Image: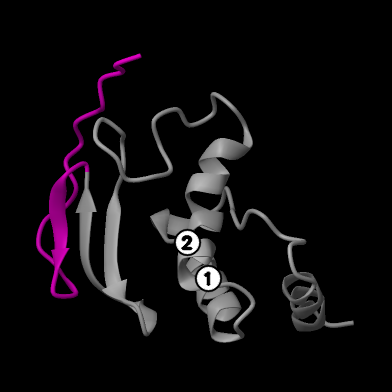
């Protein structure tokens, strides 16, 4: 059985996968997560909002206390935002890191600030 066969079996089983995550992204890149989202959506395994939640909210919620105040967009929470075309999520248009736009119209405009978040717990 190939890796593709295994992936198709898992994603096609309906409700077998709740979270898509990795702790490895070479040089901060997480292309495998984007590819996973694109794959499950294009094969109509789950709708795009569910696939995105599998890589964001569900990951942050999986282990209580691991990523407090992260995983969703709401006032007072910490979030980086990627804006991509819904028809091709690999076509990233804008990226906001810590509230600063660092990619605009698919072009890097500035490096993310190195300032650290202050805990407000």
Quarter that holds the C terminus? top left
* Distance (Cα) linking label 1 and label 2: 7 Å
Q: Which residue is pictured at 64% across the width and 77% down the height? A: 45
* Location of residue 59 in the rendering, given as x and y in whole percent from the top left corner: 56, 45
Q: Is 39 positioned to the left or the right of 76 in the image?
A: right
Q: Is 91 positioned to the left or the right of 10 in the image?
A: left
The image's mark for residue 37 is 1
The image's mark for residue 63 is none
Q: Which residue is pictured at 25% across the width and 20% down the height? A: 118
Looking at the image, tell me whether mark 1 or mark 2 is earlier in sequence order.
1
Asked if the magenta segment contains residue 64, the reply would be no
Asked if the magenta segment contains residue 110, the reply would be yes
Q: Is 110 positioned to the left or the right of 93 in the image?
A: left
Q: Mark 2 points at which residue?
A: 52
Q: Is mark 1 on a helix, strand or loop?
A: helix
**Residue sitting at the far right:** 1
Q: Which of the two residues, 18 or 118, is positioned nearer the viewer here?
A: 18
Compared with 100, 119 (above or below) is: above
Quarter that holds the N terminus? bottom right
Q: Which residue is pictured at 46% across the width and 65% down the height? A: 49
Compared with 100, 93 (above or below) is: below
* Location of residue 6 in the rendering, given as x and y in whole percent from the top left corner: 81, 75
Q: How crowded is mark 1: few (under 14 residues within 10 Å), some or many (20 or more)?
A: many
Magenta-drawn segment: 98-121
Q: How many labels does the image show?
A: 2
Residues under numbered marks 1 and 2 in contact, where contact means CB atoms less than 8 Å apart: yes
């Amino acid at each position: 059985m190939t890796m593709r066969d295994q992936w198709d079996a898992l994603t096609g089983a309906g409700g077998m996968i709740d979270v898509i995550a990795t702790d490895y992204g070479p040089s901060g890149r997480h292309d495998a997560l984007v590819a996973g989202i694109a794959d499950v959506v294009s094969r109509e395994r789950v709708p795009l909002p569910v696939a995105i939640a599998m890589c964001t909210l569900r990951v942050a919620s999986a282990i209580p206390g691991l990523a407090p105040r992260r995983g969703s967009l709401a006032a007072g929470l910490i979030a980086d935002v990627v804006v991509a075309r819904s028809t091709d999520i690999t076509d990233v248009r804008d990226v906001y890191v810590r509230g600063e736009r660092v990619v605009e119209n698919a072009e890097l405009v500035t490096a993310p600030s190195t300032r650290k978040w202050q805990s407000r717990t």
